[in-house]
Amino acid sequence: MSSMTTKRAYHSSRRAAQAAQTRADVLAAAVACFSESGWAGTTLTAVAERAGVAVETIYNGFGTKKQLLREAMDVAVVGDAEPVPLVDRPEWAEMQRGNRGQRIAKGIALNADIQERSARVWSAILDAARTEPDVAAFRDELEAGRAHDVKLGLELALRAPIDGPVFDVLFALFGPETYLVLTERRGLTRAQYEAVLAQSALKLLG
């Protein structure tokens, strides 16, 4: 009996690991497709082909293209499909270490990582929200969550409260739209983008 129980536990654990890997593969493919082709240009068939799974697998796991978009955005922000919020990750905790300039630099580097992965997915959300009311609803939820995280991160790095118009400007500065303007339309490199954010933030903060 012990041997049979061990085998069942092994097979169950193996199936769970395979399911988690399939889910991660689908979400990674979705991030890539939405980033490259936008909302209208991305199909579940294209995501399935990229992930190497059947379309039915996506329907069974996510239900709709809109739900897949939402979960793809979550993955793009943190960088993987693990259920660990950004604020509980090591890179977030790093913003507490070092002097003021070092803490700000770490926060800006983290923001650059996030925007590199997620800015184009955010653009897909904005496109979808124009015609899909439920996408517009979770767009607003995501925006509120980002405002909370940006404020928390700035206060962590600065070790001081921040609010009012200065926060509003910094929120826009650190956002995906600004990232896309600076990197795609203005042609800034990653290093130049981080430098612009650092210089602008420090001037705004005095």
Image: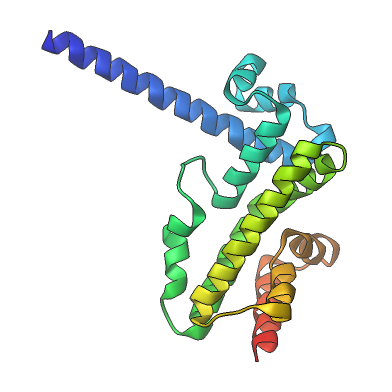
Please tell me whether residue 44 is drawn above or below residue 90 in the rendered image: above
Colouring used for the render: rainbow
Q: Is residue 111 visible?
A: no
Please tell me whether residue 88 is drawn above or below residue 37 in the rendered image: below
x 66%, y 39%: residue: 70
The quarter holding residue 153 reads: bottom right
Location of the N terminus by quadrant is: top left
Please tell me whether residue 167 is drawn above or below residue 31 in the rendered image: below
Q: Position of residue 51 (x, y in %)?
A: 61, 27
Q: How many marks?
A: 0
Work out which residue is located at the far left of the displayed protein and give it.
2
x 78%, y 32%: residue: 42
Q: With 177 as the anchor, is 164 left or right in this view? A: left
Q: Position of residue 73 (x, y in %)?
A: 65, 44
Q: With 107 as the anchor, is 48 left or right in this view? A: right
x 52%, y 26%: residue: 22
Please tell me whether residue 49 is drawn above or below residue 157 in the rendered image: above
x 75%, y 40%: residue: 135
**Which residue is at the front of the view, 130 or 101?**
130
The quarter holding residue 32 reads: top right
Work out which residue is located at the far bottom of the displayed protein and give it.
206
Q: Position of residue 85 (x, y in %)?
A: 48, 51
Location of the C terminus by quadrant is: bottom right
Q: Position of residue 112 (x, y in %)?
A: 63, 63
Q: Is residue 192 visible?
A: yes
